[in-house]
Image: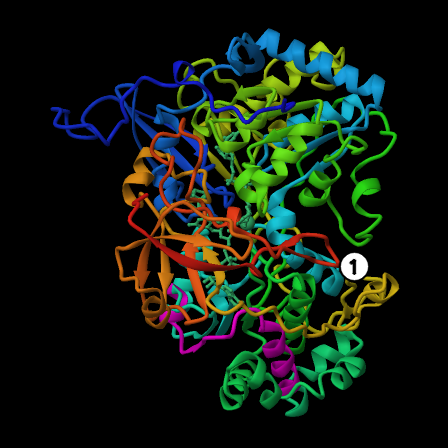
Amino acid sequence: MKRREFLKISGALGAAGVMPGLLGGCTSQPLPGTGKVTTTPTVCNICFWQCAGTMYQEDGKPWKVVGHPDDPHCRGRLCTRGTGGIGSYEDPDRLRQPLLRVEGADGQEFKPVSWDEAFDFIARRMEAIGERHGRDRLALFSHGGGGKFFRTMLQAFGSDAYAHPSFAQCRGPRETGFGLTYGEGVGSPDRTDMSHSRCIVLIGSHIGENLHNSQVQTLTEAIGRGVNLITVDPRFSVPASKSRHWLAIKPGTDMALLLAWMNVLINEERYDKDYVANHCSGFDELAAHVQPFNPEWAYLETGIEPQRIRETARAMAAAAPATLIHPGRHTTWYGDDTQRSRAIAILNALLGSWGRPGGYYYQEKVKLPKFPAPKPPKPASDWKAVVQKDFPLVSTGISNVMVDASIGDDAFFKGWFVYATNLPMTLPAGHDKMEQAAQSLDLMVVVDTMPAEITGYADVVLPECTYLERYDQLRNKAERTPTLALRMPAFEPRYDSKPAWWMAKGIAGKLGLGEYFPYQDYKEVLDWQLKQVGSSLAEMEKVGVKAFPRKTPVYMEEGKPVQFNTPSGKIELYSGLLEEVGQDPLPKYTPPDRPPEGYYHLNYGRSPAHTFGRTINNPQLFELMPENAVWVHPAAAAVHGVASGDYVHLENPDGKRSQAIRVRVTQRIRPDSIFMVHGFGHTDPRQRLAYGVGADDAALMHNVKIDPVMGGTGLRASFVTLKKTSEAS
Ligand SMILES: Nc1nc2c(c(=O)[nH]1)N[C@H]1C(S)=C(S)[C@@H](COP(=O)(O)OP(=O)(O)OC[C@H]3O[C@@H](n4cnc5c(=O)[nH]c(N)nc54)[C@H](O)[C@@H]3O)O[C@H]1N2
Ligand SMILES: Nc1nc2c(c(=O)[nH]1)N[C@H]1C(S)=C(S)[C@@H](COP(=O)(O)OP(=O)(O)OC[C@H]3O[C@@H](n4cnc5c(=O)[nH]c(N)nc54)[C@H](O)[C@@H]3O)O[C@H]1N2
Ligand code: SF4
Ligand SMILES: [Mo]
C-alpha cells in the first residue's frame, strides 16, 4: 500500500456556494459609491511585485481595489490581476478548515480538525523526527513573506533549511550571475532604470505579457519617448511588436548572440573605455576570449544575420551608457543560465550602464529594526550542508536539490513545511517528484489558501486567510525611493482560516518554543517597528504607504572610485570565483539540444490575466481567460493536420501526455517551437473552475538541465509533439 496516497479533498468538505460573478444573473444593486464607503490599505498578493493599494467597501461589501497613488510599485494603478484580487477572497472553493490525513473505512481521507488538534499532531511528529533523525531534518519550501514565520518556528526547533522555487526555478541564475560580476544582484523590484534608457534590449523578457506593474509602465514610457527597443525572442511577443528590431533567435542560442555582440563592441572599440579601465577587471582575458565569436559565426547558431548583429551592437553603443540590456527575471532556461546571465552582466559593463542613468540604478530600503526576540540555537546542519557541497557559490537553498534530498529511505529531510508554493506544477515533472517524496517523508504540512495540487500530498493542510483578511510584515523593498507599505485586514477571515504568523506561533507554543514569538498579536510587532522609524501603526493604517528620505546616491558619482563587493573590488569580467570552483571564468557557448523529428521546443510564458496557476480558479480572472491555447506555426499545423480551434494532446518523447489544449495557428511563433501560457491544466477537482481546463507545461518536462553553477532547473529544453483529439478541455 502507498504510504501516502494523493488525496482530493472530498466534496463534503469543500464549498457548496455559487461562484460570484459567474452565475450572477440580474440583481438590482445601488450605483457603486452611493452607499457607506470605507477604505483599508493593502498590499496586493496576486503576484510578487507587491503593489500597494486601497480596498474599498460599500455598506460592508467588497467594491473595488485600486492602486495607491504614492506607491512606486504601481504609481496609482493596479494591473488586471491585482484588480481581480477580490476574487481570491470570494472564491467559494477556498480551503475552509484545518484538515488531517486519516485512515478511513475506504482508505485514506482528510478529516476536518480543530486548529489545536492540527498543531498538536504537527508538534508530536516534529518531535518524533527530532528524536529519530535529528532536529535539523525539516525543510521549508515557500513563496512570499508568510514563509518567514514558519522559518522562525523551524529555526527555533533546530532546522534551518529553506528554499524558494522563485530562486531555483526563476531568478537564481540572474542573481548568481550578476552577483559574481558586480558583487550584488538585480533584486526585486528589478533595479532597471528604463525611464531614462535610450536603448533597451529584451532577451526573452516578455514585459507586457509579464505584467510586473511599474516595470511595464516604465517600458511604456520609454517606448513613448522613442527608445530604441531591441527584442530577442523566438516568438513575436508583445514587446517584439513594439520594437525597432525583433531578433527571432533560434531557441537556446542566446549565448552565441551575446558573445558576438561583445566581439563587435570590443573589436570596433565601441565599449566604454574609461568605465572599463576604472571599474572592471579581466578585460584583456575577455577581449581574447571573444575573438572567435564574430557575427558570421553567431549567424550559423542563432539564425540572426551578421549585419543585424552589427547594427544592433552599434545602436547599443550609440545610446550608452543609457542602454539597458535587461537582465530578465525567469532565467532558468537551458542549464547554462548563470553563464548567460553573466554574459548579460558583462555586456552591460562594456556599455558602462551599471550605476548610470538609463541602466541599473542603486536601490535603498528603510532600515527597519527587528522586533526583539531570542536568537535561535545553531542547527546541527543547515541548507548549506545539503546544497553547497555540489553548488558552493549559491547563496540560498535550492528547491529541486532539497526535494531530491527528501526522496528514499536514507534521505536527509524527513519533514516538510510548504507555504504558498504549488510544487507539483512549479517543479518540472513536479507531480512525479511529489509522489516520490510523499513516500519517504514522515511529515508534510501544507499552508495554502486553495485546494492546490500540493495539498493532495499533505498530512496536514492549514488554511491561510487571504491577503485581504490579514496583517503581514511591512513591505520594505529596496528601490529608488525607500517606502514602507502596510497590508491590513479589510475583512474578517472567512471560514476557519488564519494568518501565517498565528499558525507558526501556535505550533511553536505546542513545542514549548513560545518565547520565539514574544507577542500576542502581530499588530504589536508592526507598531513597535514603525515607532522605531518615526511612524506608527495608527499612521500607516491611515496613509498605507510612507516614503522615507534616501541616504545614498541613486547613481554612481562620476569620477569617484567605487568598491564593488567582489574579491577584486572591481566588476569581474573574468571570474576568479568561478575558476576556483572549476567553472568557466568567462562564459562559453554550448549549442542546445534540438527537437527530434516531428517534435517542437516546448516554450511557455505569461498572460496578463493570470499569475502562474494561482489565479486560474479566481472567478474574476477565470472569466477573462478560462483556458490556455497552444501556439502552432502554420507549417507545423499543416504537418499535423490541425487548425485553430482544434484540440490536441501534447506528448513528450517519453510518451507523457497533457490534457487536451486548444490550437491557435499563428505566424508569431517559429516553426520549430510551440508556445503556451503556464499555469493551466489543474488536476484537483476541488478547484472547480480551473480543474481540467487547458494543459500544464510542467508535467511535460523531461530533459531538465541542471545549472552547474547554481543548481537550478533549466526548463526550456523539453520537446513535445501534437496528437489531435476530439476531446475538448
Ligand atoms: N513549468 C513551469 N514552471 C515554472 C514556471 C513556468 O513558467 N513554467 N515559472 C517559474 C517561476 S518564474 C516561479 S516564480 C515559480 C512560482 O511558483 P510557486 O512558488 O509555486 O508560485 P505560485 O504558482 O504562485 O503558487 C502559489 C501557491 O500559493 C497559494 N497561495 C496564493 N496566495 C496565498 C496566500 O496568501 N497564502 C498562502 N498560504 N498560499 C497562497 C496558491 O493557492 C498556490 O497554491 O514557478 C516556476 N516554475
Ligand atoms: N501576468 C503575469 N506576469 C508575471 C507573472 C505571471 O505569472 N503573470 N510572473 C512573474 C514572474 S515570477 C516572473 S519570473 C516573470 C517572468 O517573465 P519573463 O522574465 O519575461 O519570462 P521568461 O519566461 O524568461 O520569458 C518568456 C519569453 O521568453 C521567450 N523565449 C523562449 N525561449 C527563448 C530563447 O531561447 N531565447 C530567447 N531570447 N527568448 C526565449 C518566450 O517566447 C517568451 O516571450 O513574470 C512575472 N510577471
Ligand atoms: S503587478 Fe499586478 S498582480 Fe502583481 S502585485 Fe501589482 S497589481 Fe498585484
Ligand atoms: Mo518568477
For the C terminus, the quadrant is top left
Residue 532: which quarter of the image? top right
Residue 178 visible in the picture: yes
Give x and y (percent) for residue 321.
Answer: 59, 76
Kind of residue at badge 1: Asn
Give x and y (percent) for residue 285.
Answer: 80, 81
Q: Is residue 409 left or right of residue 360?
A: right
Question: Is 263 colored magenta in this rendering?
Answer: yes
The magenta stretch is: 238-265
Residue 640: which quarter of the image? bottom left
Residue 536 visible in the picture: no
| Residue at the (63%, 24%) spot, across then down | 2
| Residue at the (81%, 64%) spot, across then down | 578
For mark 1, what is the residue?
A: 565
**Is residue 420 placed above or below 653 in the rendered structure?**
above
**Is residue 257 placed above or below 468 in the rendered structure?**
below
Q: Secondary structure at mark 1?
A: loop
- Category of crowding for the residue at label 1, using alpha-carbon neighbours closer than 10 angstroms: few (below 14), some (14–19), many (at least 20): some
Q: Is residue 704 left or right of residue 107?
A: right
| Residue at the (72%, 32%) spot, across then down | 139
For label 1, being within 8 Å of ligand 2 is answered: no
| Residue at the (33%, 40%) spot, across then down | 621
Give x and y (percent) for residue 21.
Answer: 24, 31
**Is residue 623 placed above or below 713 in the rendered structure?**
above
